[in-house]
Amino acid sequence: MSTTMTNSVEQIRNINLTKRMITFNSKIEAVRAGEAGKAFAVVSGEIKSLSDKTTAVTDKMRNDTTKDIEELKIISNDIATNMRGPDRPGSGFTCLCYQTAWNHS
């Protein structure tokens, strides 16, 4: 994954971890408050739900980005391999050039 994307995802994950800790602590305080803390417990539950969704999104971003970068590495490697020997008969780049020239003649 690119450094920029990695840093961004990690920052989101760190914020989310902090949010989870605050949520956990607020649930404890809601229980301690008894009846008066019930509404606060509901809010805490909603924040946890948002935190879970954030985790799912950042995990998907990390996985998708890693997969995309791996695919780009393969594609760029294939291009480099094809371009290394344009004067070799049968090289992919040469065949592509001949095919393109033939199609446009």
Image (tube, grey):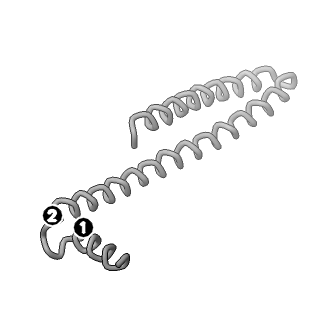
The residue under label 2 is which amino acid type? Gly
Q: Nearer the viewer, residue 105 or 43?
A: 105
Q: Residue 85, which numbered label?
A: 2
Element type at marker 1?
helix
Left or right position of 40 against 26: right
Identify the secondary structure beneath mark 2. Answer: loop
Query: Residue at 67% of width from left, 28% of height from top?
Result: 23
Q: Quadrant of the C terminus?
A: bottom left
Residue name at image x 30 percent, y 55 percent: 76
The residues tagged by marks 1 and 2 sit, at their Cα atoms, a distance apart of 8 Å
Q: Position of residue 91 (x, y in %)?
A: 19, 71
Q: In the figure, residue 78 lies in which quadrant? A: bottom left
Seen in the picture, residue 103 relative to 60 is either above or below; the reply is below
- Whichever of labels 1 and 2 marks the residue nearer the N terminus, that label is 2
**Residue positioned 70% across, 24% down in the render:** 26
Indicate the quadrant where residue 79 lies. bottom left
Tell me, yes or no, whether the two marked residues, 1 and 2, touch with CB atoms within 8 Å.
yes
Q: Residues within 10 Å of mark 1 (few under 14, many from 20)?
A: many
Q: Which mark is residue 26?
A: none
Residue 69's spot in the image, x, y percent? Answer: 39, 50
Q: What is the number of the mark on residue 93?
A: 1
Dot 2 crowding, Cα within 10 Å, few <14, some 14–19, many 20+: some
Give whichever of 41, 67 is nearer the camera: 67
Residue 10 picture location, percent across and down? 48, 33
Image: 15 above or below 66: above
Task: Please name the amino acid that badge 1 sits on.
Answer: Phe
Relative to 6, 24 lies left or right = right
Counting from the top left corner in percent of width and height, residue 7 is at: 45, 32
Q: Where is residue 53, by image quadrant?
A: top right
